[in-house]
Each structure stands twice: as structure tokens, then as C-alpha cells.
Image (spheres, coloured by chain):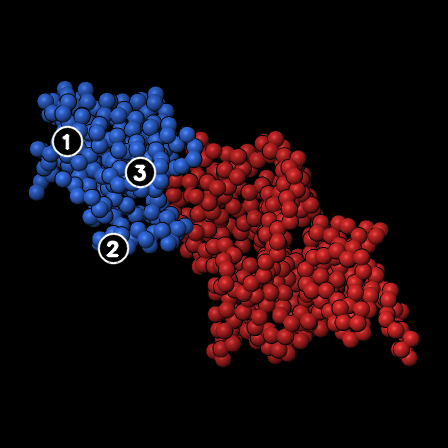
Amino acid sequence: MDLGLQGKKAIVVGGARGIGFAVAEVLAREGCDIALSARGEDSVKDAVASLSRYGTKVIGKAVNVRKADEYKEWLAWAIETLEGVDVVIPLTSAGSGIGSEKYWSNAFETDVMGPVRAVEAAIPHMTEQGSGSIVLVATTSALEAMGGPQAYNAMKTSLITYGKQLALAHGKDGIRVNVVSPGPVEFEGGNWDMIKGTMEKFYASQLRQQPMGRLGKPEEIARAIVFLASEAASWCSGSHLVVDGAFTNRTHF
Amino acid sequence: MWDTARMDVKRVVDVIRVDQAACTTRTPVEKAPDPELGTDVIPAARYYSEEFMKLEWERIWTKVWLLGGRADDIPEPGDYICTDIGKESVLIVRQHDGTLRAFPNVCLHRGNRLRPEGLGNATEFRCMYHHWTYSLEGVIERLPDLCTFAQGGPPGMTLPSLPCTEWNSFVWFSLNPEIEPFDDYIAPLKDHLEPYHPERMAWKRDVTVEWDCNWKASVDAFNETYHVQGIHPQLLWYLDDVNVQIDCYERHNRYLIPFATVSPRVAMPSQIPPAIDEIMRHAGMDPAEYEGRISDIRRDVQLFKRKHGASQGKDYSALNDDQLTDDYHYMIFPNIALNVHADDVLMFRQRPHATDPNKMLYDVWVFELLPEGEEWPERVKHRRFKHGDRSIGQVLDQDAFNLPTVQLGMQSDNFPGLWIGEQELRIRHFHKVLDDYIYGPGGKSPDDI
């Protein structure tokens, strides 16, 4: 199956590690030019260096998504340097946290406005060229209560609604929008890696609840995201794909 | 110092440390030269041999200064601490003039113990057997029917006096009447530990656990950080167990462990680890507001505490910046391990069993800094139990879990002794000091255990 991604220009916000890096890697391997961001300059540098081996144009720059002006400048720079944009995949997240009101504004700025600002920067270009693909990344923690009352789940949940609205509004312009909700994913330096080390019993209890007896790997989420982003999914829009090894208990009618 | 890049690590970390030249506080930070202690096996037999246990009693326990308890437990005349060491029991008593006296907790008549172990207040010590009665000074005040003892009362009509002293909120005693001055014995730790002002810290925990291992197995367990990656994996997201500075002095030693940082043994996470989050909250910071990198948290906690400590009623002026986050971990020979921090002290007293080299008593003492103006809390109650009957917290449970099987394994004919690495230099140093007490300085021969 040809994904039709050769020569496409993709923006991956939060593309230096974990699922974001895996997405960028699959895209690069498929022949996409890539602009990626991260908070730290070192991580950007490392990611760009690593992805350059696939022979496409890979650019990156550090940016704090919570600083709106700086972030908007970054988006403009990415589109300009890539000379266009076909695919947008914003993955930034402030992560979890309970106890301070500040977690809510952090999650709003990072998990919600991070994607919103990326979408708004890309839509005019995609509309003009009559094509484009956006994939938002929510979480299975939006579908089933997990981790206590906190901003992370609530803010991520809003992306599922927002994704559908975008798909309805921009279908006429040839822009597809889909949402992927990953289950727990483990990778070195990720939260589940830390949970495995710091909360062994909780980690083991999560594993027991996993039908396949393991957590997900970043590339398993990345391949689903990239499929939806690609031409191969040309009639997929407004969909919400749960990638969790059957972890969530509810049925997704 | 070992080569951190060649160890089992994911990253090489350059830890920011206080520079001795710029340091104006008393606790030294400079690295002491490592002693040349060789690479010999440390004989396992010394952990289970009854003969060696006897030597330890004769040449260490009855010769050195020992920790008796906390001075603020006995502020008033007649307040006393009764504490056991091996087969001996000692009364440390506050006198009418405010000084301390110590004497053996034994009635000179038929040998009955005068008091059970613990704290109390007395106007006199009366033996429950025949009511021989001793004053706070240890003098026999009443000996019923003295006229029926043809030989008269015991010599001087008084209990033998034992050396005792008070230092840094703790009371110390010795079973050795000829002991060297305490100041000489504790050197150089006065400068190290007094700046923590333990007198501003209140009891938080007082527990004694009976462990099925030799007391030295416990001392060893706290004298190295190499075991963190083995039995405390959760602490790798809390401290740097690789960039540890070890300093060996004449008989005591220490190591300095950076806290509030992520170990080079694990990948740097993107979210603040829960235990570091806790450190920030305890300092008064809101982790949600934190904009820096996780690797900068340790330094930022230091700066925050320096800036806001005074307004929180916490006077950190006698401590250097590293002391505001890090674990300065001391061993006071032979049996005290202290984790000293700006806001608390977590210490262990490791006592031999009276008769069995395969058993010991593990005392856990925790003290917490009381912010100025806050009311001094009621003293926590002492609890005592056997290992496994109750939890002593995740980390200490992890430490305790192995020790009985270590004690069993060490008795195998196939285990000649401890195979010690550089990260365990303090263990080697401890055993060298032990050797010098047992066999005389440099007197241990290859056949000695």
C-alpha cells in the first residue's frame, strides 16, 4: 500500500521524543520533509540529526508552546522554511498534575492551544492548495476516567470534539482531520518508564489490565497516526481511532 | 573517583557543587584524599563468629564513645535515659545542677536492673527487689538492714560512674572509664554537623526493629550508594547515585549525594518525578509554575530556599547551598549513620545483640526542623517490633528486606568474604577502623578474620 507521503511537508510539534519522534521518524522514512519542535535545544538538535539519515529535509528549532507569540513565529518559520505544509501533527502536552490551579492553564496552553494554534497557522495554506491533513492526539484517559480529577484528561478530551468540528468545517477545502487516542505507551524517558521505576506495583496492576500483557510502543501509535495523515486514508475524516491494544473497557460504537 | 562515563549509565552528568574556596559556612565540602585500603576480601566470618563478637565487645563496644539518646528528652533534674548496649544497660541522668551523669543500670546488691529501657523521671532509683535506693548521683541512700551486712555496703556506697557528655543535642556515654576526650573522638565532625542545628529539630519518629543480621551488615548497607540501582530503583528519579563524593576521616566517614535530581542511570523524564515534585512543594515551590528544565530543579530549589527560608521561619544561614538539597550522609564510628538535611535528620543507631552475632537492634530516629515560632510538638512514642511485623517505609523496608538473606549467605563455606568496589570505599574504611581497634593499628595479620 502506498501511503502517498513522498515529498509531503509535515509539521510535528513536540517531535523530539516519544510518540512525536516516532511519528517524525515514520514520516521521514516515507519521504516527508519535516519541521519539528521541542522545549530544549539539545533535544531538537539530536532529533534533527537522527532523522536526517533518511535523506529528506529535516528542520527543527526549540520553542515553548505556552508562549503564544514565540510559538506563532515558530509555526510561520516552519511553514516558510518547508515552503508549504501538507501534514500537521501537534503532540505537545503539559502532562498530568493535581493540586495547583496552574496545571489547568498549563494544560490549556499546551494540550489545547498548542494544537489550535498549529491548525490555525496551517489552514490558510491548506485551503489555498486544496489539500491537507491534520491529526490530533488525545488519550484513552479521555474515554475512561483515569488518574484522578485533573486538567490533562479534561483538556485532551476537548481535542476529540475539536477534531470533528474541524473535519466538518474544512472538508470542502480538501482538508481531512482525524483524532488518535493512544493507550499507555512506554519508552525510555517517558512517563510509563518512570512509573515502572517509581511505582512498581501500580505499573504491574496496569500490565495485568492489558489484554496483550504489555504497554504500547511509540511506533505503534505513530504508524496509526501516519496512516490517517496519509493519502491512503483519503476518505477518513472526522474519525477517532483508539490505539490501545484493547485496553479500554468500553466498546467504541 | 570512578569514571562515571564507563559505568552503567545513560548520561554523563556534571553536578554543580559548592566550591570550598567560596564557602563561608563551617561544613567542609572539599574531597578528602582517598585512603589506600587495598582490594582484599573482607572476611565473612566477622559477621557470624562468636569469637569475633567477643573481641568486638572487649575492644570496641567497651572502648568507644556511644550514642545514648537525645538531650532534650531529659531537660529536668531526675529525667533519665535508660539505654542498652549488648549485655550492658546504662542510666544517663540529668542532675540538679543541669549536668549529666551515667552509671550502669544494675543494683549492686543482687544484680537486678534498676529500670527498664526507655525514658523516665525519678527522684531516686529504687531497686524493686530489696529496695536498695540510689540518688540521682548514683549514691546508695538507703540500704535496708545495713547492719546485717558484716562486710558493710559496696565500695564507696555508690554505683560506678561512666563517662558521658552532651553534644549537638545528643547525649553520649562510654563503658570505658579511661576513654579519650569526646572532642578528640568525634573530630572532625563538630564543624560538619553543628551547622545543622539539630536542637531546632523535633522528634518525628522513634522506632527500634529487631533484625536478623549482624550489626555490621546494617552499617555496610548504609555505607554505599551502589545498592540504589539494585534495591531502590524508585530513588533513581530522586537522587544522583553516581556522582557521589566519598570522604574518609580518621575513624568516621561520609558521602555527599545530590538530591532533587535524576540519576544518570535513567533517561531524563519529561515530567517532574513525583519525589522531586514533593521536594519542591516542601520547599514552598509550586511545581506547576516551574518553567525550568528538570536538571535545573536541584539548583533552583537551593536558590528558592536561600531566598524564602527566613520568611518560612527556617534559618539556613549556617549551611551551604548544597546542604539545602543534598544528603550529607555521615557514619560516626562504630554504629551511627546519619542522613543530615537542612530540614530534617534521618539517623540509625545499629546495636549488637547481647549474645547472638546473627541478630541486632536497628534504631530509626527522625527529627524535623521546627519553623521558628511554631509550638514544640509532643514527643513521638517509641515503638519496637520485629522485622517484617510492620513497615518502616518503602525505602527502609527495601534495605531491611535483604539483610536476613545476606546474613544467611555469608555463613556459606563458599563465601570467603565481601568483594568490595570503589563505590563501597566507606565499607572498606569502616572495616579498617574496626581492624585497628580489634588488632591494634596495622596489627591485623592475613590469618585474622
Label 2: chain letter: A
Tell which of B413 and B368 is nearer to you. Answer: B368
> Which chain is blue in the rendering?
A
Q: Amino acid at mark 2?
A: Gly
Q: Residues within 10 Å of mark 2 (few under 14, many from 20)?
A: few
What residue is disc 1 on? A238
Q: Which badge, 3 or 1, comes first in the chain's sequence?
A: 3
Circle 3: residue type: Ala
Can the viewer see residue B350 in this picture?
A: yes
Q: Which residue is mark 3?
A: A16
Where is residue B146? Give x, y as percent: 89, 73
Disc 1 marks which amino acid? Gly
Q: Secondary structure at mark 2?
A: loop
Which residue is label 2 attached to?
A213
Label 1: which secondary element: loop
Q: Do the residues indicated by labels 1 and 2 lie within the same chain of the protein?
A: yes
In the rendered structure, the colour chosen for chain B is: red
